[in-house]
Amino acid sequence: MRRPCVRPPRRHAPQRGSVLVEVLVSVLIFSVGVLALVALQSSMTRVQTESKVRSDAANLASELIGMMWADPANVANYSSDACASNTSCKGWLDKVSMTLPDAEPAVEVNAASGLVTITLNWTVAGDSEATHKYTTATTVRSGDAT
């Protein structure tokens, strides 16, 4: 007599659906990578903007120092108090206000020692809480060079 072939009941394979899980995990990893690249690009743009404005501030301060060295007899007229009456200094103030966002320039001139201190404060757009500052100091002697 032949025995009927009895097969054991089929069990579901434990691996069923694993490909779908792998695909979902790979999409998740890819999405996190794309978000990281977007954040990196945003950060690089912000830092580049801050660097450009800081460079502009240094150039503006150097420009005013150059004007003072070219006109050493009138160095006292470049201080913040007297700057509005000095034509070249007024032009520099206008240039600062056009170049630096929310700029607050301050120029201190010590006539006795010739020490000139230029301080530029500004606020970068989108970061209204952080005030940036550039300060430089030099000596400009007026009058009698021997």
Image (tube, grey):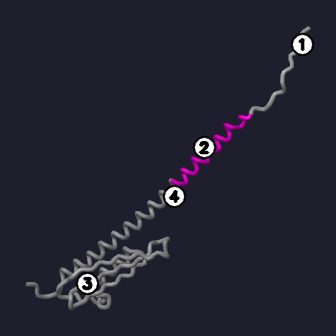
Looking at the image, tell me whether mark 3 or mark 1 is earlier in sequence order: 1
Residue depicted at x 14% and y 88%: 143
Q: What's under tag 2, amino acid-wise?
A: Ser
Disc 1: which residue: 3
When asked about the image quadrant of residue 47, the answer is: bottom left
Identified by mark 4, the residue type is: Ala
**Which secondary structure dominates the residues rendered in magenta?**
helix
Given contact means CB atoms under 8 Å apart, are the residues at marks 1 and 2 in contact? no
Q: What stretch of residues is rendered in magenta?
A: 14-36
Q: Which residue is identified by label 4? A: 39
Label 3 CA crowd tier, 10 Å (few <14, some 14–19, many 20+): many
Q: Report, in whole angstroms, how far the alpha carbon at label 3 lies from the one at label 1.
A: 111 Å
Which label was assigned to residue 26? 2
Residue at disc 1, secondary structure:
loop
Instruction: Tell me what residue is drawn at x 22 percent, y 90 percent.
Output: 111
- Residue 27's place in the image compared with 86, above or below, is above
Q: Give the label on residue 116, or none.
A: 3
Cα distance in 3D space between marks 4 and 2 = 20 Å
In whole angstroms, how far apart are the C-alphas of marks 3 and 2? 61 Å
